[in-house]
Image (spheres, rainbow, N blue to C red):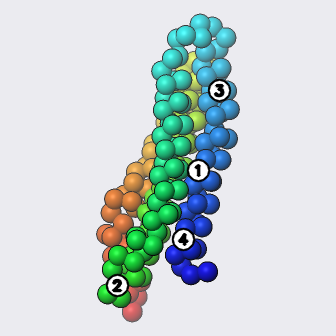
Amino acid sequence: MNSTEISKLALKIFAIYIIVQVLLSIPQFFQAYVMLSNGTEPNSDKWFILIAAASVIALFSLSLLIWKLSNNTKAVLSKNSDNSIPYISEEFILSILGIYLIVYGLTRTIVVATSAYYSLSSNDINYELTQGVIYVITYLLTALLGLSFIVRSKGWSILLNKLRTAAT
């Protein structure tokens, strides 16, 4: 197998991973909805159903986009033929890492934000709410870091190269 075939296979496996993670998060959304409604008026939290449905649709769309991108890896990997292939592959890997961090950060943010919202109605508001807010901020920062890996992959690649050569 050459590097193009390996990249295609890796991207397709990653797209399947995202689909599996989305399918595994659907029961968590329903559990969080039941916790939020507390057995009372189920129509009061329609916004939560909309957010959950939108995130599932967005992540499915992202996995389909990655699947389609895997068919075009030859064009992406062989854009430049002037011996800059290591930078392109490093930027490509940083972009894939960014997609992973975005998916991980956003799926965990939704679960932790639901837990923080639920802790508002509990008696021990200070500890649980503070911990929930810290987790929400942490996972949002993880998603933002992933977004910066995608948008500024060339800058991250240059920074990593500078760090590699800094010790010499």
Dot 3 corresponds to which residue? 30
Q: Amino acid at mark 4?
A: Ser
Mark whose residue sits in front, 3 or 2: 2
Crowding at label 1, few (<14), some or many (≥20) Cα neighbours within 10 Å?
A: many
Q: Is residue 44 above or below residue 133?
A: above
Q: Position of residue 92 (x, y in %)?
A: 43, 69
Mark whose residue sits in front, 1 or 4: 4
Q: Secondary structure at mark 3?
A: helix
Instruction: Give the label on residue 18, or none.
Output: 1
Q: Amino acid at mark 2?
A: Ser
Could you tell me which residue is drawn at 62 percent across and 60 percent down?
13
Q: Is residue 39 visible?
A: yes
Dot 2 corresponds to which residue? 81
Quadrant of the rendering where the N terminus is positioned: bottom right
The image quarter containing residue 121 is top right
Q: Is residue 138 visible?
A: no
Dot 4 corresponds to which residue? 7
Mark whose residue sits in front, 3 or 4: 4
Q: Earlier in the sequence, mark 3 or mark 2?
A: 3
Q: Earlier in the sequence, mark 1 or mark 4?
A: 4
User: Is the residue under label 1 in contact with that under label 2 (CB below 8 Å)?
Assistant: no
Q: Residue furthest top?
A: 41
Q: Earlier in the sequence, mark 2 or mark 4?
A: 4
Quadrant of the rendering where the C terminus is positioned: bottom left
Spatial distance from mark 2 to mark 4, Cα to Cα? 18 Å
Instruction: Return the residue nearer the eye: 37 or 96.
Output: 96
Q: Amino acid at mark 1?
A: Ile
Mark whose residue sits in front, 1 or 3: 1
